[in-house]
């Protein structure tokens, strides 16, 4: 599949390439072009107090190679440079052989809080484990149909300012869904029997977004001869800073989430859940980078990422939003595991591209070049010719502000 020069094409030609590559149909193309895919009545059913719909750019990054398969990755994001950086990181990865990735089984954990517990409550729950599991199973029929279901039950005790509490951890294999609704339903269904068995009172019944049993990992060896020695050294220095400085680490991980969130949004997934999982996982022990870099014996740059990813290819908003379904179709992952592997690879590519720029030329040149187009429009430029002229003059002056854009535009007039 030839996607060379994709970024330089007009929107219509990009869509044509996608159609010719069999990624979208003629109808999908229309849906993306007219931008009215999410109808008002559908939006009104999705959430409360709806008064409109909010549009964001829908982009794709072609040529993302994970485990030898080539993906076209959809991304929805408002921030300039993220898509370009991802494309850049993935291109250099492809030239180095692509990403390898793997994912855990899709096990989500639901927590049930039991308060007012006596001394033997934990033992009682452990003794009554089979009964609790049986009850929970009744509410897991939705995922059992797809090969998922109850997989385990752990019990923890925590000491709090309001006394001792039991925390039951329900482990549920949710297959290809994100799983929150499903896990929460199981928890609420099993609560009465837990009260009966433990003698305590059940309060909170909710999944944890710290999906430690549902991690995805990706790896890439960026070849020294492909990326250059200076880039290898720059990325390694940048990574070490993140590993030893929490101020940098927050931004390091934010850059990873730029890519993963954009894919989560484009595929109709709950990006807040992805965020919560990633940052809480990074904070286990002490807050640390989600990626890791080192040089191999040949001096090549090895990058790795490990991150919990509770994402689905069906369920939740995916079933309702036609644009999310299109995002899923373009990506073409056959299940949640495959989707999470691609997302992990994107997070790694995003991080590599950011460190590559930060460790060498800096990110502002590329970032502001893109942003300059927005500034030109804010300054009043309408036609492509006017926008190009304002951007060119801003590039020459290297002053990327609305004031400068206005001055240039007025001067042109
Ligand atoms: P869901 O309730 O829409 O779907 C669940 C159903 O999908 C299952 O019962 C099953 O019958 C069906 N299904 C179809 N194909 C399947 C397959 N291949 N594998 C497994 N099941 C399949 O979705 P959900 O994933 O349970 O819930 C996700 C939603 O929950 C998201 O919209 C999320 O925003 C929301 N949510 C999140 C949180 C949180 O993150 N803390 C809390 C509450 C709700």
Image: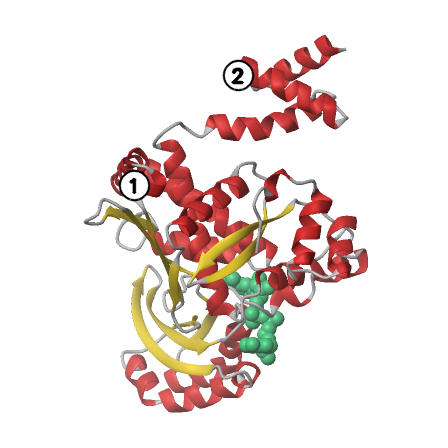
Residue 215 seen in the current view? yes
* Residue receiving disc 1: 239
Q: Secondary structure at mark 2?
A: loop
Q: What x and y, as percent, mark residue 165?
A: 34, 70
Quadrant containing ligand 1: bottom right
C-alpha gap between disc 2 and disc 1:
29 Å
Image position of 172 (left or right of 320): left
Image position of 25 (left or right of 277): right
State the residue at coordinates (43%, 51%): 94
State the residue at coordinates (71%, 14%): 409
Disc 1: CA contacts within 10 A as few (<14), some (14-19) or many (>=20): many
State the residue at coordinates (58%, 30%): 370
Q: Secondary structure at mark 1?
A: helix
List the single residue furthest toward the top. 411
Disc 2: CA contacts within 10 A as few (<14), some (14-19) or many (>=20): some
67 shown above or below 351? below
Q: Nearer the viewer, residue 125 or 134?
A: 134
Going from N to C along the chain, the mark reached first, 2 or 1, is: 1
Q: Quadrant of residue 101?
A: bottom left
Q: In which quadrant will I find the N terminus?
A: bottom right
List the single residue furthest toward the left. 297
Q: What x and y, as percent, mark residue 347?
A: 43, 51
134 shown above or below 353? below
Q: Nearer the viewer, residue 401 or 89?
A: 89
* Residue receiving disc 2: 398
């Amino acid at each position: 599949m030839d996607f060379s020069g994709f970024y330089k094409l007009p929107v219509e030609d990009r869509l044509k390439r996608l159609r010719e590559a069999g990624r979208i149909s003629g109808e999908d193309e229309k849906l993306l072009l007219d931008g009215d895919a999410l109808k008002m009545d559908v939006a009104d059913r999705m959430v409360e107090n709806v008064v409109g719909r909010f549009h964001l750019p829908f982009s794709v990054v072609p040529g993302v190679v994970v485990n030898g398969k080539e993906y076209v990755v959809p991304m929805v994001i408002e921030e300039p440079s993220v898509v370009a950086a991802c494309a850049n990181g993935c291109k250099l990865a492809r030239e180095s052989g692509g990403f390898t990735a793997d994912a855990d089984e899709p096990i989500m954990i639901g927590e049930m809080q039991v308060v007012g517990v006596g001394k033997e409550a934990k033992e009682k729950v452990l003794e009554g484990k089979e009964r609790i599991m049986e009850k929970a199973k009744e509410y897991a029929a939705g995922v059992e149909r797809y090969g998922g279901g109850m997989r385990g039950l752990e019990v923890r005790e925590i000491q709090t300012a309001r006394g001792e509490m039991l925390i039951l951890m329900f482990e549920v294999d949710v297959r290809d869904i994100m799983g929150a609704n499903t896990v929460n339903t199981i928890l609420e269904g099993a609560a009465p029997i837990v009260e009966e068995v433990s003698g305590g009172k059940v309060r909170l019944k909710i999944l944890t977004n710290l999906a430690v049993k549902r991690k995805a990992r990706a790896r890439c060896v960026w070849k020294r001869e492909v990326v250059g020695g200076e880039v290898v050294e720059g990325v390694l220095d940048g990574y070490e800073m993140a590993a030893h400085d929490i101020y940098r680490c927050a931004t390091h991980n934010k850059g990873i989430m730029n890519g993963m969130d954009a894919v989560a949004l484009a595929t109709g997934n709950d990006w807040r859940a992805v965020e919560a999982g990633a940052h809480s996982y990074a904070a286990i022990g002490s807050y640390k980078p989600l990626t890791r870099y080192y040089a191999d014996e040949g001096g090549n740059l090895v990058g790795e990422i490990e991150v919990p990813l509770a994402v689905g290819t069906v369920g939740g908003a995916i079933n309702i939003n036609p644009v999310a379904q299109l995002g899923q179709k373009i990506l073409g992952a056959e299940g949640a595991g495959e989707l999470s592997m691609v997302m992990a690879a994107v997070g790694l590519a995003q991080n590599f591209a950011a460190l590559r720029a930060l460790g060498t030329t800096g990110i502002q040149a590329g970032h502001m070049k893109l942003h300059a187009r927005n500034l030109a429009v804010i300054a009043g430029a309408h036609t492509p010719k006017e926008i190009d002229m304002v951007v060119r003059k801003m590039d020459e002056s290297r002053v990327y502000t609305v004031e400068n854009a206005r001055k240039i535009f007025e001067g042109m007039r």
